Image (spheres, rainbow, N blue to C red):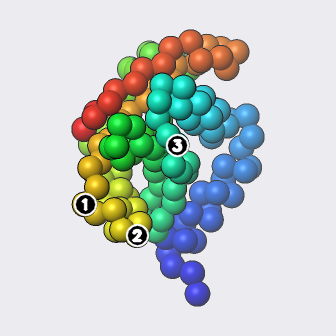
Amino acid sequence: MKTPGERSMERKAGKIQKEPGGRNALGKHAEDIGAAWLASRGMRIIERNYRCPIGEIDLIGQINGTLVIVEIRSRRSESWGTPAESVTIRKRQKLRKVAAWYLSQHGKTDEACRFDVLGILFDEKGSARKVEWIPDAF
């Protein structure tokens, strides 16, 4: 029998597949660009789209011996603020809980960890025109 969290993740995964070219496609594109961008700056990518019953982490990496939990945000315009500004207090709290789950499941509870935000602003053609990396964002 599946847990409510597993059923929720299946519903979310189904939604992503049903919207190719919509908002979720832009998010996937941003995650691909973000992973490559961070790797080119020395981050070793450990895992992408880590999911557990509590939620999801876009990217888990390591740089200079520090485990890094990365939230990747994207927007097509800055009319309502930058992509990085869209990470709410509630989202930060959730990321902390998911990170704690990840650390406990992987026996890394004593490891140094930080939370970064990577904001990507796209132009109307879907090309990244601005990338903002905020290490140790919260």
Q: Which structural element holds mark 1?
A: loop
Secondary structure under the numbered disc 2 in the rendered image: helix
Residues under numbered marks 3 and 2 in contact, where contact means CB atoms less than 8 Å apart: no
Quick check: 66 above or below 127?
A: below
Residue at the image point whose x is 51% and y is 79% from the top: 3
Q: Quadrant of the C terminus?
A: top left
Q: Position of residue 89 (x, y in %)?
A: 26, 42
Relative horizontal placement of residue 78, taking residue 92 as reference (left or right): right
Left-right relation of 58 to 13: left
In the picture, measured across the screen, residue 94 lies left or right of residue 131, that is: left
> Crowding at label 2, few (<14), some or many (≥20) Cα neighbours within 10 Å?
few
Comparing 9 with 131, the one in front is: 131
Residue 133, given in percent of the width and then of the height, sits at: 40, 24
Callout 3: helix, strand or loop?
strand
Mark 2 = which residue?
A: 105
Q: Relative to 137, does residue 8 appear above or below in the rendering?
A: below
Contact check, label 1 and label 3, Cβ < 8 Å: no
Q: Is residue 83 visible?
A: no
Give the spatial CA distance, label 1 vs label 2: 12 Å
The image's mark for residue 110 is 1
